[in-house]
Amino acid sequence: MDREWGIEESIGVAATPTEVYRAVSTVRRTGEWSPECRAVWARRGPLRTGDRFVGFNRRGLFVWFTTCRVTTARPGSEFAFRVDALGLPIAEWGYRFAPDGEGGTNLTEYWRDLRTGRSAPAAELLGKVFSGVAPERRAAHNRAGMRATLRRIRQTLEA
């Protein structure tokens, strides 16, 4: 099985790109939507480029935390952050927000694996030990999680 290094998933949301951006960039809400992230320690409100936060994650019996830094914060357009664990680069996660032409938003979540180079073996081992997911299965695992996350964001914003 070939390893995927990046994936994305999209969904339509009946809310404006500004409204969807505001919800997603308020990362303290991530635990409401993500099947893996249980809580986030961050300042209140939408984050800006350079802001840092900590994600607390759980999958079954596996529990771990990650440190994150916002890399892109363009209101109504894109929000992204880099994830590190114990100082090792792990991934970039992000969201793009595009008007759908009917007053709603096409919301795209994307993920890019950063476990490359000299630090890759250690980062891959950490990922498997903490999350229980082998590197070659990570993209498929994340795709399922992204679909669940996007559905939950839509449900929340359309309620």
Image (cartoon, rainbow, N blue to C red):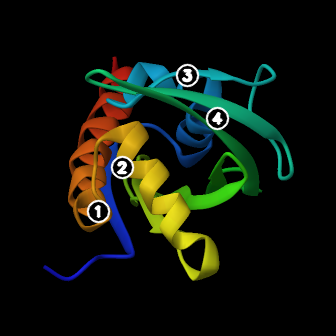
> What is the number of the mark on residue 29?
3
For image coordinates 47% across by 22% down, the residue present is: 31
For image coordinates 35% across by 25% down, the residue present is: 158
The picture places residue 94, in percent across and down from the top left corner, at 55, 56
Name the residue carrying label 4: 22
Residue type beneath disc 2: Lys
The picture places residue 35, in percent across and down from the top left corner, at 32, 29
122 to the left or right of 74: left
Name the residue carrying label 2: 128
Q: Is residue 10 above or below residue 16?
A: below
What is the CA distance from the residue labelled 3 to the residue labelled 1?
23 Å
Name the residue carrying label 1: 139
Dot 1 falls on a residue whose secondary structure is: helix
Residue type beneath disc 3: Arg
For image coordinates 28% across by 57% down, the residue present is: 134
What is the CA distance from the residue labelled 1 to the residue labelled 2?
13 Å
What is the CA distance from the residue labelled 4 to the residue labelled 1?
27 Å
Residue type beneath disc 1: Ala
